[in-house]
Amino acid sequence: MSNISSMPQFLLLALADRRELQLLHFWLFLGISLAALLANGLILSAVACDHHLHTPMGFFQLHLSLTDLGCICTTVPKAMHNSLWGTTTISYAGCAAQVFILVFFISTEFYLLTIMCYDRYVAICKPLHYGTLLGSRTCAHMAAAAWATGFLNALLHTANTFSLPLCQGNALGQFFCEIPHILKLSSSHSKLREFELLLFSISFALGCFIFIVFSYVQIFRAVLRIPSEQGRHKAFSTCLPHLAVVSLFIITATFAYLKPLSNSSPTLDLALSVLYSVVPPALNPFIYSLRNQELKDAMRKTMTGCFSGAINCIFSSAEHSLCNTFWAQPAF
């Protein structure tokens, strides 16, 4: 990457010019990141500690929470730092790392969502073959394939993007390092190779989306044959929000990466980027995981255990301090 010497840093987009709005963005991102960290942290603890959740769906939910945490922690902290301190710079190496990590986690997350959709399809449409089609070894292989594919996708995009000569300044019209805005700084003939790679990745993602839609069509057909109205309502209330989040992710990411940047507004670019990089990782725990009754019960036990442990620790410390104070008193 020969651009390091000639391009020491990039200039990110300032979310607002006024100090009050910058602080508002800081607190908004802080609230989103804390909610995502708390929810995903509880999911990780519950799945790891409760043996009732050691199922294929619990296994994939654990991996999904890891990717959600990775997505949130890649872009939001830097945006919060810039809003709080009024800066807009990011180093060349930091920008490359941010692109690689974000593409890695977003790609892996989408592949995991596709696998989890397959898990639901097998559980509802082929329940008798569930143990055969989704054994422990099969689940481990599918999860490893998702992480490996995401890593390869991120490596190819990052290496290809930052090998292009940048000849149109260093100002990015985005609050984080995004591939289309970096390509905007390179010459037009240098963009063709990365555009072909982007087109291949988007086509692959659309193929996964078509698979998800087809699976949900089969799931809904099976659900409609359920005689219980409560059972149908429970299935629809779980599937439809997940399908909506996946659709939002695919549509916004496709527009963000394939739309022409020459005539796009910064407000539209910002909205699209937030909708595919911040909103799905923040909503996934609440829409896809926290609606699971077994998971909620396990999280309640985890929180109760942690609270009880903290209370016992406080009272033990207080009792120990009182005993030390008592024995330290002089005898009469």
Image (spheres, helix red, strand yellow):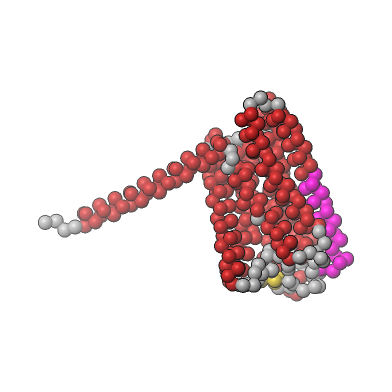
One can see residue 49 in this view: no
- Of the 4 image quadrants, the one containing the N terminus is bottom right
Q: Is residue 278 left or right of residue 299?
A: right
Q: Is residue 160 visible?
A: yes
Q: Main secondary structure of the magenta part?
A: helix
Q: Is residue 236 above or below residue 105?
A: above
- Looking at the rendered image, the quarter that the C terminus falls into is bottom left
Q: Is residue 191 magenta?
A: yes
Q: Position of residue 40 (x, y in %)?
A: 57, 48
* Residue name at image x 68 percent, y 58 percent: 274
Q: Is residue 25 above or below residue 295?
A: below
Observer-nearest of 330 and 57: 57
Residue located farthest toward the right when viewing the structure as drawn: 189
- Image location of residue 237, percent across then percent down: 64, 38
Within the image, what quadrant is residue 135 found in? top right
- Viewed as shown, does residue 116 lie left or right of 263? left
* Region of the chain picked out in magenta, as a range: 186-207
- The tally of labels here is 0
Is residue 141 located in the magenta-colored stretch of the structure?
no
Look at 56% across and 36% down and name the residue there.
293
Residue shown at the point (64%, 59%) measured from the top left: 74
Q: Could you say where residue 263 lies in the image, as x and y percent from the top left? A: 81, 65
